[in-house]
Image: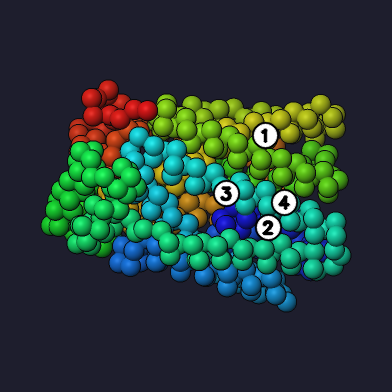
Amino acid sequence: MAGLDASLIGNLNTLPAFQTFFGTKTSNSVTGLIFASMQVGGILGAFTLRLADSRGRLFCIRLGSVGVIFGALVQGFSRSVWMFMLGRFTLGFFSTLACRSSSIYLIEISPAERRGTIAGLYNTLFFLGSILATTSVFTCQSVYRGDIAWRIPVLLQCLFPAIVATGVQYVPESPRWLAANSRSSEARDILASLHANGVVTNKVAEEFSQMQADVRQRDGLPKGWSVLYSSLSRRRRLFILMCMSFFGQFSGNNIITYYLPTMLNDVGIKEMSTKLYLNGLYAMVGWASAAMGARLHDHYGRRKMLYNCTTALAICMGLLALSMGMYFRTLETKYSLLSLAAIYMFGIIFATGYTSMQPVYPAEVMTNDMRARGMAVATMCGGTAGCINTLFAPTAMARLGPMFFFLFCAWDFVEAAIINTYFVETKGRTLEELEDVFSSPDPVATSIEKSNKERMF
């Protein structure tokens, strides 16, 4: 659902009928507004995540899915650019509620030793939506002429939220939410069902005991937003969450995801069918890399993967800036191909290191009572960063040229330094066990120490 929604606009903007209808033939302020309207909706939609604490994770997933259907219908039957932007805003607003609640839910039901793989695989399905976005646009532009060529792919956005809204009624509620809302017997039974085939084993009993102790420990703490920064350990968690949210957006991936067709045009690849094909291939390669990355995060650890991949992203951005600069000077095909290789290398590395962890790591570092509000902050931070990227990228790319990508190269090195200094390792620990890590004088050193409590594959 999220992948289709986010990737569709970049593919639609390759269609002459769409460009003529909305005036997006050239990169201008209207293009940036259309692209950013969904992210603005997502930023404001983050405030509704408090419902995940009061009404439950599944309620938010269902409500958000219904809202996405409404937003897609408004877009599909748009008669003006403002109506289309309103539909994208609505879609972004409710998609945030559904998708962030889903991340929270998966984090809370997954066994500690497989949390990165299970919850991480969720976000890799973004690429399935992206592939369907490219496929639907490519098919419709081949079969249809006129406005129907872009309206059908837009209306396709109703499909997945309809499946989710229907199917979520058969899914059990998060045991951690149930425990926090005085429904302990249900929480224990669901935990046993998900982790031990319905048998209350010693491991299940230990984890359930940790959940109950966590609930008792939180009873005397402040409520509302102040719960996020009421102690030093919580401020550490919040800092890491905000950094991770900004890094996922400012690394440069947003620019490539949204403006890949424009970038391909800049390096001499101008055939529309070729650009759509390369866009689809980018998504397929990314999906495979992200699925592999979800498993590797449970094997090597979050901190090590994020640091190494961020350093590699900086190198890729530098290579992209250099190759594009040489192409602008010489117009030689070899530099065009080098730019294309740098783009794909960046996509593979980002998908491996970041895609599966973008919703997982911020949720992991939050305590159970911080998680919904923390994910709201993460959404606002990431949405603001993404909005800035997509809103100003067309103008910045036109004015700065290849130098635009050097800015991301420098920033990615800064990100790598922050990750190495402040990010903790969460692999193998239950959500409740991380309290000992953040309460220690040196959380980073504590998190990477080998412990007999650490659960390995």
Whether residue 358 sits left or right of residue 29 in the image: it is left
How crowded is the residue under tag 4: few (<14 C-alpha within 10 Å), some, or many (20+)?
many
Q: Where's residue 78, x and y in %?
A: 70, 74
User: Is residue 110 at all visible to an observer of this figure?
Assistant: yes
How crowded is the residue under tag 1: few (<14 C-alpha within 10 Å), some, or many (20+)?
many
Residue under pointer 4: 134
Q: Name the foreground residue: 277 vs 311.
A: 277
Q: Earlier in the sequence, mark 3 or mark 2?
A: 2
User: The N terminus appears in which quarter of the rendering?
Assistant: bottom right
Label 3 to label 4: alpha-carbon separation: 13 Å
Label 2 to label 1: alpha-carbon separation: 20 Å
Q: Earlier in the sequence, mark 3 or mark 1?
A: 3
Tag in front: 3 or 2: 3
Q: Quadrant of residue 37?
A: bottom right
Q: Name the foreground residue: 337 vs 209.
A: 209
Q: Earlier in the sequence, mark 2 or mark 1?
A: 2
Tag in front: 3 or 1: 3
Report the disc number at residue 126: 3
Q: Amino acid at mark 1?
A: Tyr
User: The C terminus appears in which quarter of the rendering?
Assistant: top left
Seen in the picture, residue 56 relative to 251 is either above or below; the reply is below
Label 3 to label 1: alpha-carbon separation: 17 Å
